[in-house]
Image: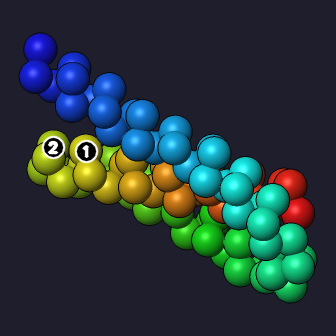
Amino acid sequence: MDSIIKSTILILIALLGIPAGILISKYAKSELKAGKKWFRLTMILSAAIFACSFLVRDDELQMIIMPVAAFIFLLSYISFRKA
């Protein structure tokens, strides 16, 4: 039961990248156009970190790495697409 609650919280944290990306794309349009290559690089790196987190044996560390990487990816992806 404890792991279900923890997993739900971590998924919600990862999904917060969507509204954060929308806010960034709304208020920082000129910076987004100038930094498109950096957003693309951030998406690639966060996706690679997310994929590599499956290789981590420690469950607690994996439960931290995956939502953070997903948050960063979603934030970058939404900002990149809206720019």
Q: Nearer the viewer, residue 68 or 46?
A: 68
Q: Which residue is mark 2?
A: 59
Query: In the displayed image of the protein, which residue is found farthest to the top?
Result: 1
Q: For the point 71% across and 63% down, which residue is it?
A: 24
Q: Nearer the viewer, residue 58 or 22?
A: 22
Nearest to viewer (mark 1 / mark 2): 1
Q: For the point 45% across and 56% down, which residue is it?
A: 69
Residue 77 visible at all: no
| Badge 2 element | helix
Is 40 left or right of 63, judged from the image as shown? right
Please provide percent x and percent y for residue 4: 22, 20
Count of numbered circles on the image: 2
Q: For the point 42% across and 34% down, which residue is it?
A: 12
Render colour scheme: rainbow
Image: 67 above or below 3: below
Instruction: Tell whether label 2 touches label 1 (CB within 8 Å).
Output: yes
Q: Which residue is mark 1?
A: 63
Q: For the point 81% across and 81% down, which residue is it?
A: 31
Kind of residue indicated by mark 1 = Met
Image: 47 above or below 18: below
Residue 28 visible at all: yes
Q: Which disc, if any, is residue 21?
A: none
Is 58 left or right of 71, judged from the image as shown? left
Is 17 left or right of 31, judged from the image as shown? left
User: Label 1, label 2: how many angstroms apart (C-alpha)?
Assistant: 6 Å
Q: Nearer the viewer, residue 56 or 63?
A: 63
Kind of residue indicated by mark 2 = Asp
The quarter in which the C terminus is drawn is bottom right
Please provide percent x and percent y for residue 20: 61, 53
Q: Callout 1: 10 Å neighbours few (<14), some, many (20+)? A: some
Please provide percent x and percent y for residue 41: 67, 75
